[in-house]
Amino acid sequence: MIPASYYLYLSAILFVLGIIGVLVRRNLILILISIELMLNAVNLTFVTFSNYWGVYDGQVFVLFIMVAASAQVGVGLALVKTIFKKKAIVDVDKFNLLGQ
Amino acid sequence: MTALLIEYIWLVLIFPLLGFVAIGFLHTKLSEKVIGWLGTAAVFLSFLFSLILFIEVIWFQETAFAETRAIYSWLSTAEVDIKISFMIDHLTLVMLLVVTGVGCLIHIYAMGFMGGQKGFTRIFAFMNLSIFFVLLLVLADNFLLVLSGWSGINICSYLLISLNYEQDTDIQAGKKIFIFSRFADFLLVLAVLFVFSFFKTFDFEQIFRTSIRTISEPGLTTTICLLLTFAVACKAAMVPFHVWARDAVIAPIPVSVLLTGLFLSAPSIYLIARCHVLFLQSPMAMSILSIVGLFTAFLAATIAATSDDVKRVLAYAAVSQIGFMFLALGVGAFDSAIFHLLTQAIVIPLFFISIGNLEYSAKEIKTGVVLRQKIPSSYRIFLIGALTLSGTPMLSGFFSRNEILWRTLGSQPLGGFVFWLIGVLISGLTVFYIFRSFFHKFYTEPAPTKNPVAIKRLKPTMSIPLYIFAFLAFAVGLLGLPHHSKLKNFLEPVFTNYVKTDLFDLEPQMLPLEISFTAIVILVSLIGFGFSYLLYFVKPEMPGRILLSTRPLNNFITHNWYMDELYQSLLLKPARYLANISVQLIDVKILDKIRLLIPQYLETLSVWLNKLQTGLIRNYILSFVLSIVMIFAYFLLKSN
Amino acid sequence: MPLVLFFIFAVVAVAAALVMITHKNPVYSVLFFVLSLLAFAGFYVLLHAPLVAGVHIVFYSGIIMVVFLFSIMVFGMNSKGTGEARLKNSSIIGLVASIVLLALFISFIKSGVDDMSQSLPMSDDIKSPGDLLFKKYLFPLAIISILLFSAILGSTFLVAKNKLKA
């Protein structure tokens, strides 16, 4: 039997890796992917607790999160594509219209 | 058997309210004619309903009729249960008939008078609303509902007076009335709070029962009654609040009629008559009531006797007559007060409408013989009104006022006689001033005008109410014949329901005495008429000379006894002074500085904060992560 | 045996995630992320959640990642000028903050009552979560489908509008 805390440590590590990816990478698409990694870390926690308590609600929540994530990916990629078409950049550091 | 219609009593209220809502919301879609008839029909339906109810009660009811009907539980707590419920007894029925009947006639008149003028829709909407509120007040069976109706009447008076909201005088008059009525509100609220703090209920029925059963503190009852008295005095333009009466006639004639004929007297007199149980326990409040009434009657009569503006004379005539009603209430003759209210609710509109017709048909001519020749109907009606008001035998005013005077005489051994004497004096003065303005209006030789006078024909909607009022001026008197008063018999159960002590006994064996005293009243009235005839008809140059010799007195009276000036110096000037000080000190020196400092600091702050906005997503995410770290650290530290 | 499997999957997941956030070429990053996701599916199977595992593989590793790859390839975002992971000042602060966060997480999990090795029994079927989804969570399901639908509309609009202008 694997202790649930192992899974929690693991998901914490993966979540922080996702954050690092978001903070360090400059490619917009990679930022999106890092966010997916963070979401997956959270999913893992949900399933872990679902298993720990012996109820299925956590699994259902994971399914919902996946749907939300796919929606996010859809809109995010559409935005990235629009920006790319206009400016031909995917570098977030060169894209600071708000600060100008 | 109870009257059938009693279950649907809320219909009386709902008609005018619906009329108001319909006119208010649909006025852009409806033509003027439809609006007029809609407003009139709303009040007429209420009148019809009250009339049928009244007939039902008279024919099918052997015993005294008093019912309450709750239609909605407004506020229910453990301590108090306030319902929207209506109390219908004989007094209510009479008031319903007066309010809806007179209101309906005024609506009809307004259709003619206001036709084609600005504010036509507004006047009908507001008149309907105000009728609704008066009916609410009359039907209410607890003090809170009374308060609602009362405040509603106030706001309606304000709206009606400032109908021509583009004219500065009207706006000022509206404001004045509003302030005075708010003051009346304040007093009434205080009275209601006192009532509640003592009786722990708002219900009339319970309050009256408790007040009789328990030996209540006389001080408290007196306080409540005095507060009620002054609230009502403020509302009815009694001394020292009479200054706003002359502003009530600035608005168009239908508004003046409604205000002076109904709203001045009906709510006030009704409220005191309703609370007569409380008043009877406080002799002091009663005597103050009668003194206020008598003094007002005298004061208003003097003002009316010196005023040259007919409308103002009429306004003060109305106030003076309400003074008589107060006197009647004060000496315990509640049914006489209601009777006088009834006759005055007919006479005052009669005057105003005839004057309004003059204004309508011949706008340029203010006075003169021409008016008498060209518009004879107005002339005749004004004469009937004058005769009624001055108490010509067999007309309604005669019965109502003489009854008040006679009851006053019988109330107390000495005070009653003094009151009676003053009352008789005022009767003479009344005759004097009303005929003074009558001669002034119809018998003076006008300055010759070049262009021929254009006389507009009266519309039927303007003359028909006039004739109805004139007929009523005769007919109503028959309701209150001395010793055979139908009205008194009808009202008697209301006023003997709680208190058995009989204040209403007119002893038949004193008939010769009564007749002789009445003869004195008639004599004094004749003297008044004689003066008026002599001064203003036979020798029109006399008054000028008299005025010259009594200038200070005259000034004193024409300035409303300097009451306006008193208010000016006592209230307005200190208020203005305070306002000035607060402008210069608080506003300029303190608030303005703060006002200027805040944007300065904000600007510095915003310039500084602006640097944080780099527009780089990375930085935003970084701050996001940092805050997560901080939140987590906080909870971790807190848990350890 | 499960413990061994868990450690294998854990090493794969963390290593793949590390490569993903450090690799210069986005295409490789995505591919390594897919690997990491497959390891996630392994965890789900170990945690008695076969339905989630299946959906995860089909949905994430399959559809979403393919879309990512597709867009990178089509728009040529893997060209040299972009995607270089040069560390800036703010990135270093971010790195430090992330590590502090990790420490906080770990101490947070440590502060729990025990290592939570005793979990309640659970069957391995996919019927129970399905029941729950279509009975208890029917309304949220409807809401989330509306969300997805609006997301589709939104992204379509964004792209189509751009096309109209071009």
Image: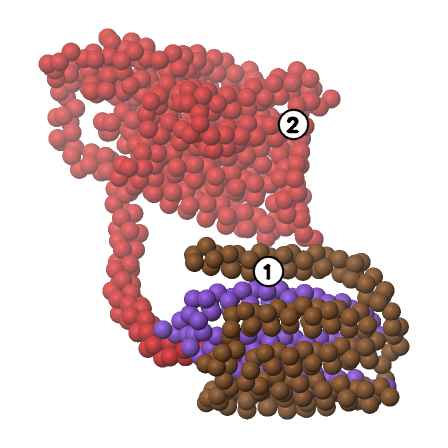
Chain colours: A purple, B red, C brown
- Rendered residue at 45%/74% (across/down): A89
Residue B251: x, y in percent?
Answer: 32, 31
Which of the two residues, C21 or B613, is positioned nearer the viewer here? C21
**In what quadrant of the picture does the N terminus of chain B appear?**
top right
Packing grade of label 1 (10 A; few <14, some 14-19, many >=20) is many
Three-letter code for the amino acid on which mark 2 is drawn: Tyr
Residue B127: x, y in percent?
Answer: 44, 30
> Element under label 1?
helix
Which of the two residues, C114 or B117, is positioned nearer the viewer here? C114
Three-letter code for the amino acid on which mark 1 is drawn: Ala
Residue C90: x, y in percent?
Answer: 47, 87
- Rendered residue at 58%/33% (across/down): B139
**In what quadrant of the picture does the C terminus of chain B appear?**
bottom right
Image quadrant assignment for residue B415: top left
> Element under label 2?
helix
Q: Is residue B229 visible?
A: no
Which of the two residues, C158 or B42, is positioned nearer the viewer here? C158
Image quadrant assignment for residue B5: top right
Q: Which residue is mark 1?
A: C151
How far is mark 2 from mark 1, CA to CA? 58 Å
Q: Indicate left or right for B141 with C11 as reference.
A: left
Q: Which mark is residue B8?
A: 2
